[in-house]
Image: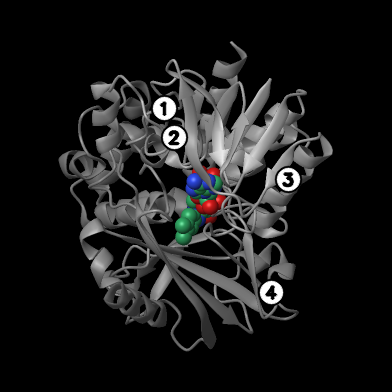
Amino acid sequence: MKINVIGAGLGGLLSAASLAIEGHEIEVFERLPITGGRFTNIEYHGFSLSTGALHMIPHGSTGPLGNLLKKIGADVEIVPCEPMAMIRIPANGSNNYKSGFKDISFNQFGSQFSMWNRLKLAILLVTTRRWPPKNISFENWIRKYLNEDSAHKTANSFCGWALSLTNRDVPAEEAFEIFENLYRYGGTGIPMGGCKGVTDALVEIIRSNGGKIHTNTEVSRIIVENNTARGVIADGNKHYSDVVISNIGHPFTRDLYDSYTINNAYEEKIDNVKSSAGIKTCLAADEPLIGHNGILLTPYCRRVNGINEVTNTDPNLAPPGKHLVMAHQSVRQEKIDKLEEEIEIGLQDLKEVFPNKKYEVILTQSYYDGWPVNRASSGSDIGNTTPINSLYVVGDGAKGKGGIEVEGVALGVMNTLDIIKQ
Ligand code: FAD
């Protein structure tokens, strides 16, 4: 089959590489001069910063992405994070880090709770696996069963770090599917070479199997005939194919074609897709600020949800002797026009989290609208098919259930491949 792919982000490259090794004729069209989308590196004075992701793979080498990379023979080493995550909690029951703090393991998060809530938590950990909650937000679920400030703060910090949302925006059902995936696949990992280590390996597979990748080439239309995708128009030229895979989310994909019959149910679903926004701050330090390669969740910050220090796994992501530390904070939609204030509060947070430490802020990036943290925030994904035959959507605008970020991208790609092969 001839397959055209719109976009060379992780979703597009994973689909293209998986299909290229099966002998399909692949052409990928990417409007930027580089491949990798929000999952590649930006070199800055010897630091490998990134176009998006924090160089982390949520379920490491044993999750959906790690397994798919292995299956297609991608040459990527993913190092497990030990510990997976720590939680920074204030000293003396305070509500902030100003008078000191200690770090506890993520698995011990219940130790902050009252005796009664610890008992309830132990029971809930078993019962929710059997009877996952439905039709309630994660925030309201916590309010109902564990009404404790530290539980709200920790859940917010986790949702902010992993999904760039508050627990108010995450359906409890999706949150528990994510926890189920943590049991199923295990915790985080860091790819050697950072995000670029992954996407470059996919580019290599596509090219070595005869696939073509056109950078600086924007797709302006999807050719649709008889309600079936027949190819794309890129740089004014028609490129015909049997299948079109779009890596740009449902709403932007929908803007690229005319259809004679309006599918109201699909249009309504598209209107409900919400992206998630965030701010990433990159710090350079001469000494480790965290000292391990896992996530440091910071529930008592005003804005920063969590921080990592990837140079504890791959020192080559910074110049010799230096450390690269990245902080993430989610941004609510109503704060997008106040980004500078949000960045300033985040920088103040970092001073509290790292008192008496010397570091330099080397980059602050904000992500929203067409270049968000997630094209479809977790829980608002609408699947990989479209009302147009042979037109599919992959990437973080069409993730699989419970799939955190790139794991959701991999689940969505696998689902799409299964449908195409039927
Ligand atoms: P994209 O990377 O956006 O790819 C889409 C591509 O399509 C882009 O290259 C774009 O230029 C191209 N394109 C758009 N329109 C057209 C057109 N008309 N024609 C041709 N090309 C077009 N995930 C993790 O798992 N771990 C993390 O640590 C992590 N941290 C994150 C931190 C931040 C701050 C952000 C922003 C994201 C983070 N993520 C993380 C999420 C992760 O980066 C994304 O889920 C993933 O990169 C999305 O890949 P994608 O292929 O769906 O989309």
**Residue that label 2 marks:** 398
Quadrant of residue 414 in the image?
A: top right
The amino acid at mark 2 is Ala
Within-10-Å neighbours for mark 3: few <14, some 14–19, many 20+: many
Which image quarter is the C terminus in?
top right
Distance (Cα) linking label 4 and label 1: 38 Å
Please identify, in this view, whether the residue under mark 4 or under mark 2 is nearer the observer. Answer: 2
Residue shown at 35%/34% (left/top)? 174
Within-10-Å neighbours for mark 4: few <14, some 14–19, many 20+: many
Residue nearest the viewer, comparing 142 with 100 = 142
Residue nearest the viewer, comparing 214 with 300 = 214
Distance (Cα) linking label 2 and label 3: 21 Å
Ligand 1 closer than 8 Å to label 2 CB: no
**Residue that label 4 marks:** 318
The amino acid at mark 4 is Ala
Question: Nearer the N terminus, badge 3 or badge 1?
Answer: 3
Can you see residue 76?
no
The amino acid at mark 3 is Val
Question: Nearer the N terminus, badge 4 or badge 1?
Answer: 4
**Residue that label 3 marks:** 203
Query: Residue 31 placed where, x, y %?
Result: 56, 52
Query: Residue 56 placed where, x, y %?
Result: 58, 54
Question: Nearer the N terminus, badge 3 or badge 4?
Answer: 3
User: Does the CB distance between marks 1 and 2 fall below 8 Å?
Assistant: yes
Secondary structure of residue under mark 3? helix
Ligand 1 closer than 8 Å to label 1 CB: no
Secondary structure of residue under mark 4? loop
Within-10-Å neighbours for mark 2: few <14, some 14–19, many 20+: many
Query: Residue 59 placed where, x, y %?
Result: 57, 42
